[in-house]
Image (cartoon, grey):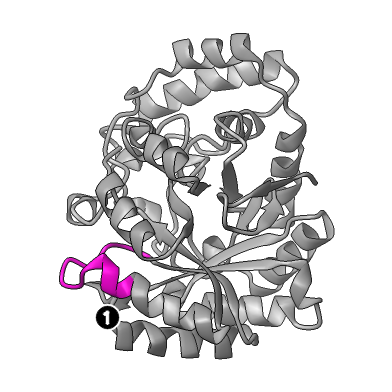
Amino acid sequence: MRTRNLGSTGPAVSELGLGAMGMSTGAYGVSDRAEGIATVHAALDAGVTLVDTADFYAMGHNELLLGEALRGRDRDSYRLSVKFGQLRGPGREFGGQDSRPEALKNFLAHSLTRLGTDHVDVYRPARLDPAVPIEETVGAIKELVDAGHVRHIGLSEVDAATIRRAHAVHPISDLQIEYSVLSRAVEADVLPTLRELGIGMTAYGVLSRGLISGHWSADRTPDPTDGRTFLPRFSTDNIEHNLALVETLRRIAEAKGHTVAQLAIAWVAAQGDDIVPLIGARTRTRLTEALPATEVALGQEDLAEIEKAVPAGSAQGDRYPPAHMTSLGVGN
């Protein structure tokens, strides 16, 4: 597994990262804890060194799962990226973002306990808190950096102006944001700003939450606990259009001897060495399929063919429901 740097100030990590959200029930349906732990072990054994989670994934269950999976591993052999601040209620409803200095320090204390570690490698607010200036949030995380509890500061789903303001307080290692062949809004302003400032990107949703994995079908009935039930791109109004795009990608992929998932992951990785795709595999089977994407070489002709087949803006439907779109720094 080759490595890439998270920006000019961040750590060197594997060229693919592991997103752990789906290993907890509530993201993509009912999860299997044992299989999730086995998948983490398989990823680490394959050379994956970046593992991403959040304190609000399944109300802390995801961090507890990772704490168990990582127990006994050399702490210097992997990097933990943790998001914080999304408030949840007993019914798992979302209640906004809390990025107050006193709150984030409390959040981190709980995360460190659940993860079984004394530090996280990248700590980031999950969304921008409209009630707290980003300078205050980053300043508070800087205090945690100075104390040794956090190694690097990241951001998630914010616009170019917010990135500049945050970076002026303390160097930002990377921005975590959705980026895929179907979600390309970052290309207009955000990605150029990151490159100007020497900030990396960890790209989540590279398979559009399974939509372009090659394993989704229009007649699939999601589990009631599957969060994709509420996503516009999976709705009955949009799914057939979007799956037609997937079939176009499948034809390109199979002509090159790859799966559509491998092609989609490789496309993100090919957009620059400063981008690290996060693979949301929750089973060893899906991990095994995803890892060969690192060996998919896409030249300019290949990229042009993909661009022609699935141009920017071709997906139908927003990437989140309307209530959640308002909290994003960029759109689709």
Q: In the figure, 196 relative to 10: above or below?
A: above
- How would you classify the magenta stretch by its main secondary structure? loop
Any part of residue 93 in sight:
no
Q: In the figure, 238 relative to 324: above or below?
A: above
Q: In the figure, 213 relative to 47: above or below?
A: above
Q: Position of residue 282 (x, y in %)?
A: 63, 59
Callout 1 secondary element = loop
Q: Nearer the viewer, residue 295 or 6?
A: 6
Q: In the figure, 219 relative to 165: above or below?
A: above
Query: Residue 81, located in which quarter of the rendered image?
Result: bottom right
For the point 45% across and 53% down, the residue is: 176
Locate the C terminus by quadrant: top left
For the point 80% across and 55% down, the residue is: 47
For the point 40% across and 18% down, the residue is: 311
Q: Is residue 277 left or right of residue 60?
A: right
Query: Residue 273, located in which quarter of the rendered image?
Result: top right
Q: Is residue 31 magenta?
A: no
Q: Nearer the viewer, residue 134 or 310?
A: 134
Query: Residue 148, located in which quarter of the rendered image?
Result: bottom right
Q: Position of residue 31 (x, y in %)?
A: 57, 67
Q: Is residue 134 magenta?
A: yes
Any part of residue 253 in sight:
yes
Q: Is residue 79 left or right of residue 213?
A: right
Q: Is residue 83 left or right of residue 306?
A: left
Q: Position of residue 222 (x, y in %)?
A: 43, 52
Q: Residues within 10 Å of mark 1 (few under 14, many from 20)?
A: some
Q: Nearer the viewer, residue 34 or 302?
A: 302
- For the magenta stretch, what is the residue range? 126-137
Report the amino acid beneath label 1. Arg
Residue under label 1, please give it: 100
